[in-house]
Every structure is written in structure tokens, then in C-alpha cells.
Amino acid sequence: MLEDVIYKNYGLIMERQETKGNYRCFFSNNYLYTIIPIYEVNENELMERLKMSDFMKRQGDPYVSSFVPTINETFLSENDDSVFLLLGNALLEEPRPVRMGKKLARFHERGRIFAEPLQECNRIGKWKELWEERIDRLENVWKEKVQSNPVNEFERMFVESFPYFLSLGENAIQYLVDCEIDDDPAGNDAGTICHERFYSDLWLGEYLVKNPFDWVFDHHSRDVGEWVREHYFRFPHTYRPGMTRFVEEYSYYTPLSSFSWRLLYARLLFPVHYLEAIERYYSSSKEDDQRHVEDFLQNYLQRTHHYEEFLREFYDVLRVPIGKLRIPKVDWL
């Protein structure tokens, strides 16, 4: 049993257990421990995440998780046929109220000082390549479904909608390329420690945990853009006040350059929610999961014109001086 392995390897008794995000957690001796499953052992990636964790803790962030060594002073443990490691956090309650924009800006400010070279966790300059690969994979699936004819309602929606989202993805890539060609990064545009996908709930809850396995090294607009996207989809009719407050808080501490705005907007253009839904459907063998994805996609497609309106009004809502900053708009929106 996992409880026996934890006690044998770490000398810890698993007290109250719960789930936080995608991870299983437990409490022991006034610490919160997060169990990180390791599906493929990549020592370079683990070392990079360890370095980022240690660095952010040295910068004074008490909410960053620490790697917990075993009694034998290693980080990896085995349970049956699986490999895992432990992260530990002291039980520090998050102060209220939470000013998420300010907190994220301070996190990025600390992460921008990180000077260790990274390979596995680095995403700087890789958006175009990653986006193209993702679109190409799904385009191949789409071509197969067109030739074989859709077998159910989900595939019918996929076959009919993909050309639109392919075009949207290509627009995002072109907007990104134009930014990298036409604009120059400012001082705040240096790489920093970011998140694979940043959203409000990641830093909310009874206890705040900043998990280095959620991190990548990238441009700060990644986190700002992903927060804005998630906030819009959560509050599609009332998103403006929260989005404005978040961006104003963030930009007060880290002003957004024209380069930052354009990267952020390219990220919002890229239809990641749509692509994820298709990927999730075809990677799942469970009917309940597929039915849930089908319902999501149907609802998502019905709101496409609302998202176009959001993109069209984005700069105006946030009062971005696009003329002064020479930020282009997307003509077809």
C-alpha cells in the first residue's frame, strides 16, 4: 500500500488525504505533502524543477513546494509499478483578500532573476513550433475523419468546425510571427518562471501551494493570457471588471510593452480550448468522458461568435493605446 511505502521511505504517517488539482495530497506533522507521479523519468527535467524550486524559495517565497528526500537521500520512490516523488509545504494560510494580478507580477519579478540555463522546461521562442505541431496532428485526424465519414455527433461537429479553428490557429501563428519580426522586446520581456497553464484556482484554496511541476520558463504574457482566457470562459457575460482589475494590478508592477501585448493577444487567438477538447476525446476510451467532451464542444461552438466579440473588443476594453504602441488589429474580426 502507498501508506506503507510513504512511511518506509520518508518516515511519514499519511493523515488526512485530499486531492488538489491533479495531485493526491496528504497532511502529516503540520505539513502538506503532494504526491507527484513520474510517468517517464527524465533526470534533466527533474533537476531543472528542483533548481527552480530552490531558487524561488531563496527569493523569499514561502509558498513554493520543496522536494522531499527519502530516508536514503534520493527523491524518487516506487509503489507497485509506479514511480513518484514528494513535495512538501508548511501549512501557511493564504492571506485575504487575494490580489491575483499583483501576486503574479511579484512571482514573475522573482523568476526573472533566475539565470540557470534550462532545456526541458524552456518554452521561450517555441510557441510557433509547438502550435504548428499541435495543429498538424489534429489536421491529420480531421482528414481521416473526412475520408471515412463521421460515425457520431462529436465527429460531425469536429469535421464541420475544424476548418474555422485551423484558420484561427494560423492567424494566431501569423500574429506571433509578425510580432517577433516587427517589434523589439523591452526590459521586462526577459524570460521568467511561468506556469504551463495559469488560472485563479491554482493559487486559491485553504492553503496556497506553488508547485514547480506546474512551471515552465517563458515570457510573462503566457500566464497573463491564460488567466484572462480562463476568466473569460468562466464568466463569459461578466468578465470585464475582473479582467480589467487583474491586468491593471499586474501592469502596475510590471508594465506591459507592445511586445507583451502582442504575444498575449496571439495566445488568446490560438484556440487551445477547442484543440484540447478534440485531443481529450480521442485519447479517452471512457464513454462518460467522451460524452462530457461532446457536451463541452457543443456549448463551445455555440459561443464562438461571443469569443470573436471578446477578441475584437479586447484592446478597447483594457484601454490599450494600440495607435501609440503600433499594435495591429486582426482585420477579419
Image: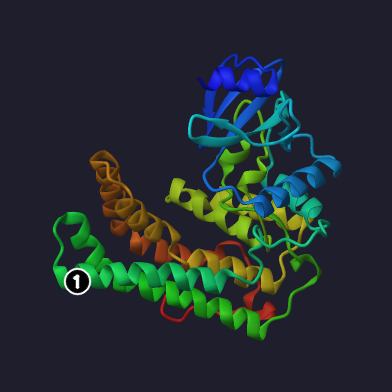
Residue 204's spot in the image, x, y percent?
A: 61, 34
- Judged left or right of residue 206, residue 254 is right
Give the residue drawn at x 42%, y 65%. 309
Residue 149's spot in the image, x, y percent?
A: 14, 67
Q: Quadrant of the C terminus?
A: bottom left
Residue 210's spot in the image, x, y percent?
A: 68, 39
Give the residue drawn at x 46%, y 81%. 331
Give the residue drawn at x 57%, y 69%. 127
Give the residue drawn at x 75%, y 49%. 52
- Judged left or right of residue 128, residue 144 is left
Q: Is residue 96 visible?
A: no
Q: What residue is disc 1 on?
A: 146
Q: Nearer the viewer, residue 66 or 20?
A: 66
Instruction: Determine whether 230 is above or below 88 in the image.
Output: below
Which kind of residue does numbered mark 1 sit on? Val
Mark 1 residue element: helix
Q: Nearer the viewer, residue 83 or 182?
A: 83
Instruction: Determine whether 225 is above or below 178 in the image.
Output: above
